[in-house]
Amino acid sequence: MKKIIIAAAATVFFSAMASANSGLADRISDARSYPTKTASTKVSETLKMQHKKIHAQMEKLELKSNDPA
């Protein structure tokens, strides 16, 4: 009887280790696939500055085209 209990306990232990319920593999995979936040912040800041410059240029061109002179 003791052998059956030990075998059942070992089976439960190893089956719990093999399950993917913890999500550890997903967290590791996500950490590898996404860039760090500092890099994305730098990129977004430069994009914001470029966006502002483009809008300023568009406003200048729009003012020149509306100029009655």
Image (tube, helix red, strand yellow):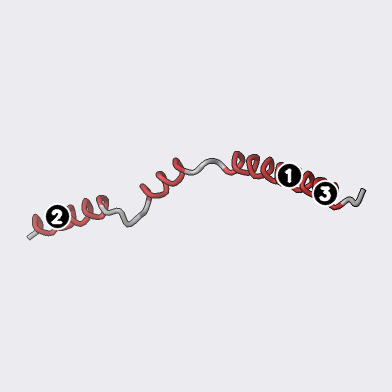
| Dot 2 or dot 1, earlier in sequence | 2
- Indicate which disc residue 2 carries: none
Residue 22 location in percent, x, y? 35, 54
Left or right, 56 with reference to 9: right
Q: Amino acid at mark 2?
A: Ile
Kindly identify which residue carries mark 1: 54
Q: CA distance from mark 1 to mark 3?
A: 16 Å
C-beta proximity under 8 Å, tags 1 and 3: no
The residue at the point 21 percent across, 54 percent down is: 15
> Mark 3 to mark 2: distance in Å?
87 Å
**Residue where numbered disc 2 is placed:** 6
So how many labels did they put on this image? 3
- For image coordinates 90% across by 52% down, the residue present is 68
46 and 2: which one is in front? Answer: 46
Q: Position of residue 28 (x, y in %)?
A: 41, 44
Circle 3 residue: 65
Q: Residue 38 sits in which quadrant? A: top right
Q: Residues within 10 Å of mark 2 (few under 14, many from 20)?
A: few
User: In this rendering, is residue 58 above or below 21?
Assistant: above
Say few, some or many: other residues with alpha carbon within 10 Å of mark 3 (under 14 / 14 to 19 / 20 or more). few
Tell me if 7 is positioned left or right of 52 in this view.
Answer: left
Q: Mark 3: which secondary structure? A: helix
Q: Secondary structure at mark 1?
A: helix
- Sequence-wise, the earlier of marks 1 and 3 is 1
Which residue is painted at 7% across and 60% down in the image? 1
Q: Amino acid at mark 1?
A: Ile
Q: Comparing marks 1 and 3, which lies closer to the viewer?
A: 3
- Tell me which residue sits at (37%, 53%) in the image: 23
Q: In the image, residue 44 lies at what x, y percent?
A: 64, 44
**Closer to the camera in the image, 32 or 19:** 32
User: Hey, what amino acid is under mark 3?
Assistant: Ser
Callout 1 crowding tier (Cα within 10 Å): few <14, some 14–19, many ≥20: few
